[in-house]
Image (tube, rainbow, N blue to C red):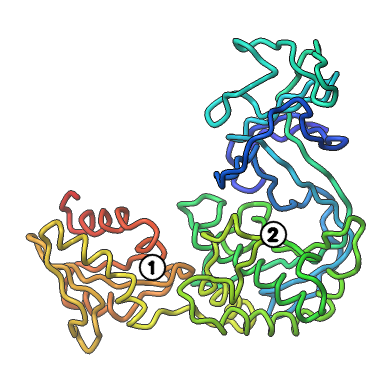
């Protein structure tokens, strides 16, 4: 079969390929000097990501629900887990003794298989005092393929809600990725509680759809037991009950983004910074009932706090809560060449398809107006400031 030259999702040509091997097993190096544990940070030789769906024949008949916004399918799927090594450079492996190490480069320079960039003899990891003359090969990705039961959920949002934009060209926005990641974690936790099974029995992830549509994504849950234990199928049969429990889980906490009382746990500690229950809840409510994600005025004030402070440091004054044509303006920025009316929109909503009353009121008074993304204000404040100055024609 011919290899693809373009990404089937975004159409980009920046695809990378590397050989993939499945290790027969793992063992510690018997000749390595044992380090004393002084509480130092753990050093990782790469990280195994969540299992990904292998390219395979699409499912047959989907079960439609929620006006086509959620479609589900359950059945056997093949998944793959891959460790790409430090810096995604792969691993070098000796075919004689089995010694493996991350590929030399930034982040890993203590190589034993190479010297001056050339393969060299090295200590046998499983025989004390034995030197191996094998020539290390690679680099390779290390991985594992396995069949299991999976629940596939094909998600489609309705305008003005969006998961991607024309700017992202077939990829999902950062806010959408965070929302989907959080929704997967909440679904898996809620499902284990509804089915009354151990939290370690189910996992999941999400993926863009072929063609890079900005209004679609695919989410999946799978049994961690190879071959499947039937849990994913059971989740599909009780999907509405699981979605109810997911909504309660996401909406029943008072934390600003996520915590151990809602969707954080030890198993997802490497993505804690990418979890936001509010984004997941807004997405879930839209998928189930078509609700449009909205921000109340206090939410807008909170996310605009950093912008106001940064503008003050630059000598730019601003006001919050000014009334304009009966609308309360979240922020009015006083610039030398005119005032700028700033509103804030939900990160999952396209402001061009859902213009706010604040923007309409400002333009009726021939004022410059701008709607900023709440996610950008929190996670990329310099970009939001640059947009403010660019809108009024003043350099940042």
Tag 1 secondary structure = helix
Mark positioned earlier in the residue sequence (2 or 1): 2
Q: Residues within 10 Å of mark 2 (few under 14, many from 20)?
A: many
Picture quadrant of residue 188: bottom right
Q: Residue furthest bottom?
A: 326
Q: Which circle marks residue 205 in the picture?
A: 2
Q: Residues within 10 Å of mark 1 (few under 14, many from 20)?
A: many
Residue 226 left/right relative to 380? right
Q: Which circle marks residue 130 in the picture?
A: none
Report the number of discs.
2
Say above or below: 180 vs 47: below
Give the residue displayed 81% in from the left and 66% down from the top: 201
Residue 310 left/right relative to 334? right
Q: Which circle marks residue 374 in the picture?
A: 1
Residue 181 lies, in percent from the top left, at 61, 62
Tag 2 secondary structure = strand
Residue 293 lies, in percent from the top left, at 48, 78
Picture quadrant of residue 301: bottom left
Residue 150 left/right relative to 375? right
Picture quadrant of residue 336: bottom left
Give the residue displayed 79% in from the left and 20% down from the top: 94
Residue 294 left/right relative to 80? left
Residue 92 lies, in percent from the top left, at 72, 24
Q: Residue furthest left?
A: 336
Residue 338 lies, in percent from the top left, at 10, 65
């Amino acid at each position: 079969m011919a290899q693809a030259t373009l990404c089937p999702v975004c159409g980009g040509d920046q695809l990378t390929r590397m050989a993939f091997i499945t290790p027969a097993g793992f063992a510690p190096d018997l000749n390595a000097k044992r380090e004393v544990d002084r509480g130092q940070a753990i050093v990782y030789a790469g990280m195994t990501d969540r299992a990904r769906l292998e390219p395979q024949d699409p499912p047959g008949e989907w079960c439609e629900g929620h006006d086509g916004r959620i479609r589900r399918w359950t059945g056997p799927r093949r998944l793959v887990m891959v460790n790409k090594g430090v810096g995604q450079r792969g691993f070098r492996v000796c075919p004689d003794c089995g010694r493996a190490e991350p590929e030399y480069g930034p982040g890993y320079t203590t190589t034993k298989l190479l010297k001056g960039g050339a393969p060299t003899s090295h200590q046998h990891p499983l025989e004390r005092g034995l030197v191996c003359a094998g020539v290390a090969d690679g680099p390779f990705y290390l991985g594992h393929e396995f069949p299991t039961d999976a629940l596939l959920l094909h998600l489609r949002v309705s305008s003005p809600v969006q998961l991607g934009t024309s700017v992202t060209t077939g990829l999902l926005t950062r806010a959408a990725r965070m929302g989907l990641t959080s929704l997967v974690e909440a679904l898996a936790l809620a499902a284990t509680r509804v089915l009354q099974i151990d939290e370690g029995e189910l996992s999941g992830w999400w993926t863009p759809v072929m063609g890079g549509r900005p209004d679609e994504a695919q989410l999946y849950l799978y049994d961690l037991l190879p071959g499947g234990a039937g849990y994913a199928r059971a989740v599909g049969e009780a999907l509405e009950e699981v979605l109810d429990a997911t909504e309660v889980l996401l909406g029943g906490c008072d934390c600003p983004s996520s915590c151990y009382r809602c969707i954080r746990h030890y198993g997802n500690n490497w993505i804690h910074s990418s979890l936001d229950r509010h984004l997941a809840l807004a997405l879930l409510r839209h998928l189930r009932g078509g609700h449009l994600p909205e921000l109340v005025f206090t939410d807008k004030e909170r996310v605009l706090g950093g912008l106001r402070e940064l503008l003050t440091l630059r000598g730019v004054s601003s006001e919050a809560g000014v009334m304009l044509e009966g609308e309360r303006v979240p922020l009015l920025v006083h610039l030398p060449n005119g005032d700028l009316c700033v509103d804030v929109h939900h990160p999952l909503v396209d402001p061009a398809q859902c213009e706010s009353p604040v923007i309409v009121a400002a333009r009726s008074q021939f004022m410059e107006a701008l709607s900023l993304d709440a996610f950008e204000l929190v996670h990329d404040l310099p970009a939001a400031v640059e947009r403010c100055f660019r809108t009024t024609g003043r350099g940042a």
